[in-house]
Amino acid sequence: MMERIAEASPGFKARIAGVFYLIGGLAYVVAENFVRGRLVVYGDAAATATNILAHEPLFRLGFAAELISTVCFIPVTLLLYDLFKPVNRSLSLLAAFFSLVGCAIQALSSLFHLAPLVVLGGAQYLSVFKVEQLQALALMFLKFRAETSSIYMEFFGCYNLLIGYLIFRSKFLPRILGVFLALAGLTYQAFLSPPLANYLFPYLLAPAGALGELSFVLWLLVFGVNAQRWKEQASAAGGAIRT
């Protein structure tokens, strides 16, 4: 399958990347907003533990959704690397590096999401701890997940900045898409300070991310790339042209 994708047209690769990007993004929204947003109360360990135990299938769904998001972004990274090689091979490779490191961090982050189920699972060896201590541990793991996720968003922001620049320099995608995506990546740098990012999220990060990423994904899904211009740029760069 990977060989067939490698031999496919640039337009087909762009649409496949858009499909995986959309699935991964929706899965992340489910995990973040419809699971953790409903069940986790960061200032109340007891309420969080009660919510998790009362809605354990939903909480497990959040883990599965986050894992799907991570897995989906690996083919996105590889496909976009291949698409943007003709623009600048080194920067495209650097962007792929940031993305894959970010995927690894997100995978680690998802383990912290799963940890409260172990802590609150009622295993015999945990009976040495008081209930309040176990609830505090569960919330601590979820806070670790949030901190780790902030690091992931830093890498993802750098990825968006580089891909945005590559789009702007390309001849086969509208430059405005690159501007929007680069702005989204720039706003994600606010995650250097998680409290600042949390404060700005509804006012700046969410709108910028939606504008940059959604416009890019929808363009890939609907229009793909201008195959003729991609081939011309690939030829000028000395890259291999596949039809």
Image: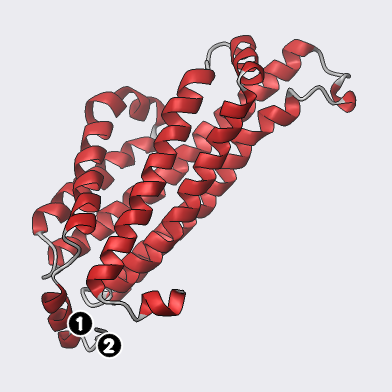
Disc 1 element: helix
Disc 2 element: loop
The residue under the point 40% across, 43% down is 153
Q: Position of residue 204 (x, y in %)?
A: 23, 30
Residue 59 appears left or right of 180: right
User: Would you place residue 226 above or below residue 201 in this image?
Assistant: below
* Residue beneath disc 2: 240
The residue under the point 74% across, 26% down is 119
The residue under the point 64% across, 16% down is 54
Q: Position of residue 13 (x, y in %)?
A: 30, 68
The residue under the point 23% across, 25% down is 203
Q: Camera-side residue: 199 or 54?
A: 54
At label 1, the amino acid type is Ala
User: Would you place residue 208 above or below residue 122 in this image?
Assistant: below
* Residue beneath disc 1: 234
User: Would you place residue 158 above or below residue 54 in this image?
Assistant: below
Q: Camera-side residue: 80 or 185?
A: 80
Residue 1 visible somewhere in the drawing: yes
Q: Are marks 2 and 1 in contact (CB under 8 Å)?
A: yes
Residue 166 appears left or right of 109: left
Q: Position of residue 105 (x, y in %)?
A: 52, 49
Of callouts 2 and 1, which one flags the residue occurring earlier in the amino acid sequence? Answer: 1
Q: Quadrant of the C terminus?
A: bottom left
Q: Position of residue 189 (x, y in %)?
A: 32, 41
Local packing at callout 2 (Cα closer than 10 Å; few below 14, some 14-19, many 20+) is few
Residue 51 appears left or right of 168: right
Q: State the CA–CA distance, disc 2 to disc 1.
A: 7 Å
